[in-house]
Amino acid sequence: MSDGTGVAKDPKVIDGKAFAEGLRAKLARQVATLKEKHGFVPGLAVVLVGEDPASKVYVRNKGEQTKASGMASFEHKLDAATSQADLLALIDTLNKDPKVNGILCQLPVPKQIDPQAIIDAIDPDKDVDGFHVVNAGRLATGGKGLVPCTPYGCLLLLKDRLGDLAGKHAVVIGRSNIVGKPMAQLLLNESCTVTIAHSKTKDLPGEVRRADIVVAAVGRPEMVKGDWIKEGAVVIDVGINRIEKDGKGKLVGDVDYASCYPKASAITPVPGGVGPMTIALLLNNTLIAACRQHKVALPE
Ligand SMILES: Nc1nc(=O)c2c([nH]1)NC[C@@H]1CN(c3ccc(C(=O)N[C@@H](CCC(=O)O)C(=O)O)cc3)C=[N+]21
């Protein structure tokens, strides 16, 4: 396979960037269809309070991609000293605005604000992060909700590689509400046998060695080592860690790529793996939310 640069692509490497580009091209066509047939475009509101470095990268990429897909982007950049009451008032306005179909408040928020209060305040039907308890409950009970973007993106990459996931043993490392828990739910819904490992897991390398699918979402740079990986396993790296290496800033995942690569049958790189998928699925969730709010079918 070639990407036009003359450099052959490594088939072992799961190209999340290319997959996300394909998704976004499809989204742009769907958005165009909605505009033509139904006279509306999906709208996404992103709220950023203060300046978190990880959120800034995310906001920059997202803003460009929202507009490129033909959707409406509403950015609200608030001062780091914003009170919880003021933020809740903005969320209330966005909940009531019919042009806003999706709302995302960047996390983390400054310490005077309780993130749970913000998540609880967002209309579940506009909760494109899928963090609201109603959406977590729908995912857990097989209902029609909005699925958190990062695990959703990981699932699409896995299904693209493996097809049917039924019966696979999946080990999810990390138990956050944002990635680990919803990832485990999604894999369970695909009939995987799922283990959720975490900081208190007794023999983490031993647990990971049994996995056909490894999803690493702990936020610890290069923690998962090659000798933990069963020959032929598929490795999905959710981590985005900025580290200093040889005096330079570098982006690494939760997986020690160099040692895991030879063992895996497929592996996601950082950057260019799961990260771009998160944004593509955010736009996809916005499209889904908009279609439901307008009571029209999702275009082909
Ligand atoms: N309510 C909320 N929802 C989120 O989903 C959320 C959030 N808050 N706060 C911040 C984190 C971070 N996050 C990223 C998503 C994509 C990339 C991404 O596109 N990464 C690229 C580029 C990375 C780079 O070049 O720095 C890659 O991995 O290839 C990064 C980071 C979403 N977050």
Image: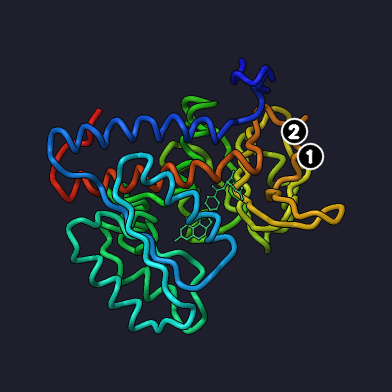
Closer to the camera, 68 or 86?
68
Identity, as a three-letter code, of the amino acid under mark 1:
Gly
Mark 1 CB within 8 Å of ligand 1:
no
> Which residue does the numbered mark 1 point to in the structure image?
226
Q: Is 165 drawn above or below residue 79 in the view shown?
A: above
Distance from disc 1 to disc 2, alpha carbons, whole Å, reads 7 Å
Q: Residues within 10 Å of mark 2 (few under 14, many from 20)?
A: many
**Residue at (25, 47) in percent of width and height:** 42
Identity, as a three-letter code, of the amino acid under mark 2:
Tyr
User: Cβ–Cβ below 8 Å for labels 1 and 2?
Assistant: yes
Q: Is 157 drawn above or below residue 98 in the view shown?
A: above
Closer to the camera, 192 or 177?
177
Q: Residues within 10 Å of mark 1 (few under 14, many from 20)?
A: many
Q: Is 156 drawn above or below residue 59 in the view shown?
A: above
What colouring does the structure picture have?
rainbow
- The image quadrant where one finds the N terminus is top right
| 285 left or right, relative to 53 | left
Task: Identify the disc placed on residue 261.
Answer: 2
**Residue at (37, 49) in percent of width and height:** 147
- First in sequence, mark 1 or 2: give its number: 1
| Secondary structure type for disc 1 | helix
Q: Is 234 drawn above or below residue 10 in the view shown?
A: below
Residue 122, given in percent of the width and then of the height, sits at 30, 66
Residue 127, given in percent of the width and then of the height, sits at 32, 58
**Residue at (68, 55) in percent of width and height:** 241
Residue 231, given in percent of the width and then of the height, sits at 73, 29
